[in-house]
Amino acid sequence: MKKLLALLLSGTMVLGLLSGCSSEKKPVESDAPSAPAAESAEPAPEGKTYKVGFSNVWVGNTWGVQCVNELEAFLKNNDQVSEYYIYNADNDVNKQISDIEDLIAKGVDMLILQPISAESVAAVVEEAYDAGIVVVDCTSPLSDATDKYNVSVVARDYDFGYVGAKWLCEQLGGEGNIVCLDGMAGLSSAVLRMEGANAAFAEYPGIKVLASEYANWDYATAKPVMENLMAAYDNIDGVWSSGGDMTRAAIEVWADSGRDWIPMMGEDCNGFLKLWSQYKDDGLSCIATSLPTWLFAYGAELGLEVLNGTYTGEKDIIVEIPTITNEQVGDYVREDLSDSFWCGTRMSEEDIQALYGNGNDGSQGLSGQGVTGDH
């Protein structure tokens, strides 16, 4: 909890870095809570329980795996949740629509979803809402397609990209060549992060982006991508990355090359933090921005308040992007846990150890059924 509090408080660095942004999409201050703890105006009705359904986009990397684990840890430990269903659409819009229809048929009281495409799922989301189901949107906004949802919890992906790029430009003194490891083509989070990065790069005429390549937020995909970039360019001065697992791969490739260390942007995944800690004294400088893995669990918490009639917050909540600096990395790295763990967690230490201790990567899930399929 002390680490999580420090991580959230480090969001003050974000506000300082954002002060120079001149883009039309300049991040703005929000009254939304920066911590995942929600306060109820009234106590929950005693003995009242609910069925909860979750429609996820994809569980294709360690961040996605922990997001599901965070949600399941919250649901299984909450006395108000009688049943829950977790569906993985595997980035297929038609499957997500079918999954939501199935959850409606199962009579869930709450639908939590990360929409693949807001426009594509709007009709079925409206069907759920009109049926009296509490709809909770997470990470990817629905608001451009429909207003038929109860609460939305998203993070500032634009800020995520902008803050890391701004830091990178400042580390280079406004002069240098950068390569970018982008997320997944077409997904709103990747698009917004890249827009934020490009806005920061535009503020420094001496910064040149040599190349930007998709690596799907995945360690295994990013490794050959980085190898190819290093083979193509011998004058790389910095790495901007849309995700920490990709930066982990970039650091390994760079270490093998023997080149002098350059600044790199990462995220709060443990494998990246371990390498950052290992090479920091040799000259590696990094920043970790964070899209918290607890967003779905936080959405479930707020959804229960809506069901209980105790929710008094805003309909659209924007969570600030926390950061970790060179001076702070030692406070967050967990050498006792696997590379797949993400440090900004809400889970109990017992659940963390069960999922990520003894070399586990979390994919087995708390139930032992795994997190990549429907359960």
Image: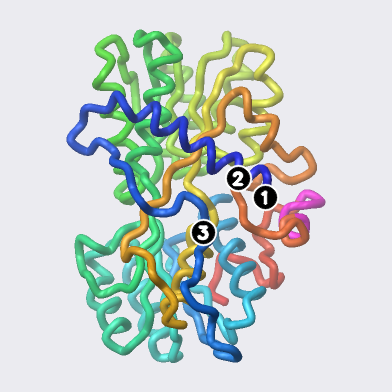
Circle 3 sits on which residue?
Answer: 59
Circle 2 sits on which residue?
Answer: 5
Q: Secondary structure at mark 2?
A: helix
Query: Looking at the image, which residue is at 44% across and 44% down?
Result: 216
Type of amino acid at the residue the image marks with label 2:
Leu
Q: Secondary structure at mark 1?
A: loop
Type of amino acid at the residue the image marks with label 3:
Val
Type of amino acid at the residue the image marks with label 1:
Met
Judged left or right of residue 310, residue 193 is left
Q: Secondary structure at mark 3?
A: loop
In the image, residue 298 lies in the stretch drawn in magenta = no
The residue segment tinted magenta is 353-359
Structural distance between the alpha carbons of marks 1 and 2: 6 Å
Structural distance between the alpha carbons of marks 1 and 3: 26 Å
Q: Please report whichever mark, 1 or 3, sits nearer to the chain's N-terminal start.
A: 1
The image quarter in which residue 353 lies: bottom right
Judged left or right of residue 342, residue 30 is left
Q: Are marks 1 and 2 in contact (CB under 8 Å)?
A: yes
Residue farthest to the left, as pictured: 24
Circle 1 sits on which residue?
Answer: 1
